[in-house]
Amino acid sequence: MVARLLDAEWPRLRRLAARLRRRPPRLVVFVARGTSDNAATLGKYLVESLTGLPASLAAPSVVTLYGARPRLRDALVLAVSQSGRSTDVVEFVEEARRQGGLTVGITNDARSPLARTAHETLLCRAGPERSVAATKTYVAEVALLTLLVGAWARAREVEQGAGALPDALAATLKMEDEIAARAERYRYMQGCLVTSRGYNYATAKEAALKLKETCYLPAEALSSADLLHGPIAIVERDFPVMVIAPSGVPLAHLRQITARLAARGAETMVISDDAEILARAKVALPLVAPVPEVWSPAVAIVPAQLLSLHLAVARGFDPDRPRGLRKVTFTR
């Protein structure tokens, strides 16, 4: 899937990146819901760290419910929606286009309302996402955002690391049997925290969402910095905490956090390629194919997705058909 995306979308991404360099926007606004909003969280980090421009996550209801008109002229509005049919996302894009903002849609459906509305469309090319809980389209959205912002900023680590991504994902998927065996340990888990920092804060948010959607667990995602500002008080002996800690700038901080959690007797599940932090984990989920930090969110989410899948099965649930959810949610 990712190899197909790289081949098909790279030329379009390069052209769009060149356009953004010729006429830079004054700011970047992301608009999304659900899983796609978690991908957009990564987009915000990438834009601000690689281009230096301010970026925000839109509140679509400001336009659709309150009738407000945020000043979007000369802004880049990046809308992320796997179906391309989220009503409030599309309406926000329509408003941005009316005001003279440049609108880009990231979607898995070339015939969707979002694809028809946005000036430019980048396609996930993931094939039909049959499960209600989106997985492969999330990875595709993350890959597209990383490619776009990296090409725009001429970030060498993005282009150099892109070619290794398909093999890294394939190697991570081979961990499925190991992860399935570990999932049984958490069959009776009642809730957990999921934490990371930097680019992988988005991974923590998406991992927590998957645990909610498929396992019906109250799982809260927190930046590891925010965890220290109060919420760590709820962590007692055997309290489950998932730490997502690929190699990169936040790793030293995440090592310290994991050590503090271990000292409190927490049940730590650690997703990482770093031997030191894995050694502190109650359950270690190693990343067997490390990639540059900027690409790590596309890979680090996979063990969390597999854990959610097999934990749902262990708890007697159908992970493809979560109760009370539909594939497309329409909100205004």
Image (tube, rainbow, N blue to C red):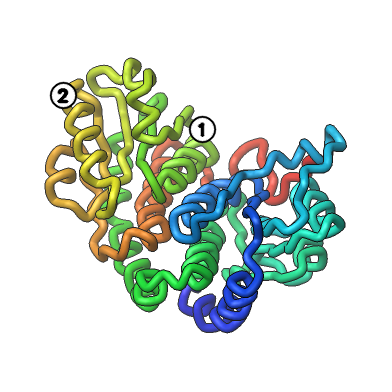
Q: Residue at x 61, y 61 (%)?
A: 129
Q: Which numbered circle lies on residue 263?
A: 2
Q: Distance between the residues labelled 1 and 2?
A: 29 Å
The one nearer the camera, 187 or 269, is: 269
Say which amino acid is labelled 2.
Ala
Q: Is residue 72 left or right of residue 231?
A: right
Looking at the image, can residue 313 be seen?
no
Residue 288 occupies quadrant: bottom left
Q: Position of residue 151 (x, y in %)?
A: 50, 73
Is residue 142 visible from the viewing direction of this image? yes
State the residue in front, 307 or 8: 8
The residue indicated by pointer 1 is: 216
Q: At 52% across and 83% down in the image, what residue appears? A: 7
Tally of numbered tags: 2
| Residue at 17% across, 44% down | 277
Q: What residue type is labelled 1?
A: Tyr
Q: In the rendered image, which quarter is residue 141 located in?
A: bottom right
Spot occupied by residue 120 in the image (x, y as percentages of width and height): 72, 70
Reply above or below: 137 against 268. below
Q: Is residue 96 left or right of residue 54?
A: right
Task: Give neighbour class at mark 2: few <14, some 14-19, many 20+ (Cα, 10 Å).
Answer: few
Foreground mark, 1 or 2, reads: 2
Where is 320 relative to 119, above or below?
A: above
Which residue appears at 53% of the width and 57% of the height?
Answer: 138
Q: Position of residue 39 (x, y in %)?
A: 54, 52
Q: Is mark 1 on a helix, strand or loop?
A: loop
